[in-house]
Image (spheres, rainbow, N blue to C red):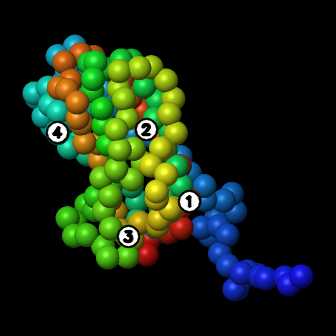
Amino acid sequence: MATATKKQVLTQQQFGGVPYGNKTALIYRLATNASGVWTDSDQATAVASGDKLRLGVLPSGLLLVDCLAIISDLFTASVTGALGFEYVDGVDSTAVPQDADYFFAALAFSAIGRTRANNLAVAPVRLPKDAYLILTTGGANIAAAGVADFVIEGILTGAT
């Protein structure tokens, strides 16, 4: 029976140059008021089905590992969302293409609970540059107060 070893296994970088490691969890929130307006946005109108919401910036060099969606206050019935990323500079990358549903393709916002990323067809990717975490809504317009938190888990490897 043969023994195989990963190339450069003894010299591969394990941490981001800090003594306490580099695994991180970044939290992004979507909260709407009773009229369906995103309370922490530059838009004064209710979130409509098909809107793209930039929830925050994922830093360059972040290895995307997982996402936990926490719906703690219900949104309008039938509201769904796709969660992914697109680059801040607006220019796609051939090495790591933008992906609007990297974490979720159709997350239901009508039930309280915790859901792990369920887009099983994707492998972890390292962002070559800063990217927006984007939520693209679907199913119905938001017309009620609701709260969703997205915990992005990853490994900070430093800017590329």
Q: Residue furthest front?
A: 1
Above or below 55: residue 1: below
Q: Residue at x 32, y 43 (%)?
A: 82
x then y, percent, for residue 87:
28, 62
Q: Which residue is mark 2?
A: 150
Q: Residue at x 17, y 26 (%)?
A: 141
Q: Which residue is mark 1?
A: 155
Pointers 4 and 2 in contact (C-beta within 8 Å): no
Q: Nearer the viewer, mark 3 or mark 2?
A: 3
Query: Which mark is on residue 50?
Result: 4
Q: Residue furthest left?
A: 45
Query: Which mark is on residue 2?
Result: none
Question: Identity of the amino acid at label 2?
Answer: Phe
Mark before the other along the chain sequence, 2 or 1: 2
Mark before the other along the chain sequence, 4 or 3: 4
Q: Nearer the viewer, mark 1 or mark 4?
A: 4
Relative placement, left or right, of 95 versus 122 is left
Report helix, strand or loop for mark 4: loop
Residue 143 position by quadrant: top left
Crowding near the residue tagged with mark 1, few <14, some 14–19, many ≥20 C-alpha atoms within 10 Å: some
Relative placement, left or right, of 115 versus 14 is left
> How far is mark 4 from mark 3, CA to CA?
24 Å
> How far is mark 2 from mark 1, CA to CA?
16 Å
Camera-nearest residue between 56 and 133:
133
Q: Residue at x 84, y 82 (%)?
A: 3
